[in-house]
Image (tube, rainbow, N blue to C red):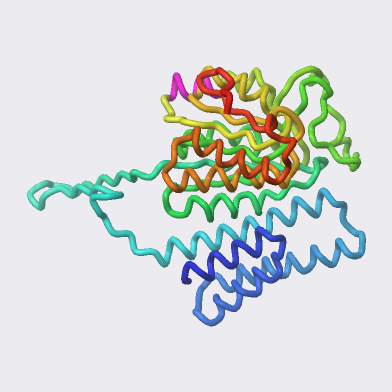
Amino acid sequence: MDSALRTQIRDLIGAGKGDKALDLFVNWANTSGSDISNDLIGLKAQYSALKRNENLGLISYSEANMRRNQITNGVLTLLEDVGNASTTVVATTETRTTTVSTPNNSSNTQTTTDSKKTILFMGANPPGTRFIQLEVEHSRISTRVGNTFNLQTEKFLSAGDIPELISKYNPNIIHFSGHGKDPKTGEHGATNDTTRGLARLPEGYEQKGGIVVFDDDMRGLVIIEDESLDYLFDSTVNDLKVPLEVVVFNSCYSESQAKAIGKHVPYVVGSSRALDDDLALAFAEGFYFAMGEGKPIERAFVTGKQKVVLKKPKSKDLIVLYNKGVKMDL
């Protein structure tokens, strides 16, 4: 599959047009003789059934949102697999170094290193929380960094996933897209859908900030409080020696997270109050465009903030940057 078609399919998914994206993908698979045709047809049937059940009112908003994200995540995974399969990996002195033992050795060994830095995109929009455009945000980040970074993704983040993802990918940048909890009011992105009690704040969470993720069975939400995030990033950087350069909390009320982990991570981005979805997307676009161009973190932050302020002039103090635990005046 050529890159133009892959980009078109990703953009359609990002725009919420999953049915059209699937039509394009299925058509390509049928004409190219790809062995993923049956997988795609199955996903298309699931998507059609979901739309029908939504129109008939047979499924709640939050449940429909979760299922839609699962389907589109499956499409994006297949798209990535197709791209990897069609790319010929060639060792070059620019991006990869390969060492192969001489024939005199009893066994051949091969070592490959990749000079690209890694962005770990972690998203969560659990049932009972307001819909956010995770697919759009991921697609726009992917488009803007291009091939300059390795972009790794988990769009259904639970608390237990985080240590495993960090251990697996050793990221330089962590980007969290989701909901944050206001330490003053307890607001955490809940909707009026109180099915299974998901919109009620769990016992003991009052007066504490944090991020909202899926629970372990993926049917509800839990809040990872700032105290836990403090330990997580302390151990990640200081004990595991993960080369983290910046953590971006693209979520509401996340300045408290920036304060909590800022003493461990060189740069942390957060939001001083509620963050509208369109402003979160605007910041991500500008920040990762600049990062993809090789600009330093502080300049990338300003580029992202410029896009936010151009969209909403009274938001100059909304997005904040902490450097070594100190809030920067940018």
**Where is residue 311 shown, x and y percent of the image?**
70, 46
Judging depth in this view, the residue of 84 and 136 nearest the camera is 136
Q: Main secondary structure of the magenta part?
A: helix
The range drawn in magenta is 233-240
Q: Is residue 197 above or below residue 84?
A: above
> What residue appears at the point 78 percent right and 47 percent down from the top-left corner?
131
> What residue appears at the point 63 percent right and 29 percent down from the top-left corner?
320
Could you tell whether 24 is left or right of 291 in the image? right
Judging depth in this view, the residue of 308 and 211 nearest the camera is 308
Give the quadrant of residue 162: top right
Asked if the magenta segment contains residue 154, the reply would be no
Can you name the residue that lies furthest to the bottom here? 31
Asked if the magenta segment contains residue 238, the reply would be yes
Q: Is residue 223 visible?
A: no
Give the quadrant of residue 313: top right
Could you tell whether 85 is left or right of 156 in the image? left
Judging depth in this view, the residue of 68 and 306 nearest the camera is 306
**Where is residue 288 shown, x and y percent of the image?**
53, 45
Could you tell whether 141 is left or right of 15 in the image? left
**Where is residue 90 shown, x and y percent of the image?**
28, 59
Q: Quadrant of the C terminus?
A: top right
**Where is residue 46 shown, x and y percent of the image?**
73, 65
